[in-house]
Amino acid sequence: MNKMINDASYWREFDNNEITHSAAHYLMAIDSLRGRLGYARVTDVAEMLEVSRGAASMSVTQLKKRGWVTEDPNRFLLLTEEGAEKARLVEDNFRILSDFFEKVLGVSKDLAMADACKMEHLMSLETGRRMVWLMRYILSSEKRASEVCEVMKCFEECGGEAAVQDGESVGDGCPAQRKRPCVLNGD
């Protein structure tokens, strides 16, 4: 196994992420409810996220402690400037990831959305910006988009089995440019 893959300085970064998956969805739920209804209460958030009122209350309390949520005099939930920024970043990351997975990699919309949801709160602003730039570069040219589509057809033809082999990294070259790009298991 490659030492870099199991390097503690990288995998421990997961625990140091500023926002959890759950916190991201609470912030986005509050933002969505305020946009749709003009207000958000803990009971509304609980209903939207399909959790108990008690669970929602405990999570909202943690968001308040982080300074991401406050209440108005009527006890309606409000996102602070920082909370709104976090919600926007996660929503943007979701759109970037799901678009990339679907439009560039060619996975189904459902799979693109499911995978994007798992990763949206983890991706940095810089990585998101670079993915957007890459997507715009690829998709802004019909020729380039077509070439990427053809390369991805090779992946589909070989069932993805030979996409990355033991010890190989992305930097080892494009599978579609190898002499035998669609070979299964080294056959």
Image (cartoon, rainbow, N blue to C red):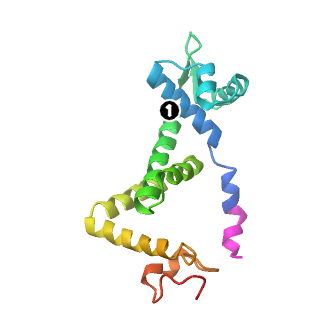
Indicate yes or no whether the magenta region holds residue 56: no
Identify which residue is drawn at 68% across, 76% down. 2
The answer to whether residue 61 is above or below residue 19 is: above
Q: Quadrant of the N terminus?
A: bottom right
Residue 146 in sight here: yes
Task: Please tell me whether residue 177 is drawn above or below residue 45 in the rendered image.
Answer: below
Q: Is the residue 13 above or below the residue 39 in the image?
A: below
Q: Nearer the viewer, residue 60 or 176?
A: 176
Q: Position of residue 26 (x, y in %)?
A: 60, 32
> Is residue 5 highlighted in magenta?
yes
Left or right of 16 in this view: 143? left
Total numbered labels placed on residues in the image: 1
Q: Residues within 10 Å of mark 1 (few under 14, many from 20)?
A: some
Image quadrant assignment for residue 6? bottom right
Relative to the observer, which residue lies in front, 48 or 3? 48
Quadrant (top left, top right, bottom left, bottom right) of the C terminus = bottom right
Work out whether 104 lies above or below 50.
below
Image point (54%, 72%), residue name: 160
Where residue 89 appears, x then y in whole percent?
49, 42
User: In the current view of this chain or complex, which residue is farthest to the top?
Assistant: 74
The kind of secondary structure element at disc 1 is helix
Which residue is found at the position 26% from the left and 64% from the top? 141
Q: Position of residue 107 (x, y in %)?
A: 48, 59
Which residue lies under the disc numbered 1?
A: 84
Expressed as whole percent of the image width and height from the top left, the position of residue 71 reads: 58, 18
| In this rendering, position of residue 166 left or right of residue 150 | right
Query: Can the viewer see residue 80 in this picture?
Result: no
Please provide the residue range marked out in magenta.
1-9
Q: Main secondary structure of the magenta part?
A: helix
Kind of residue indicated by mark 1: Ala
Q: Residue at x 55, y 30 (%)?
A: 29
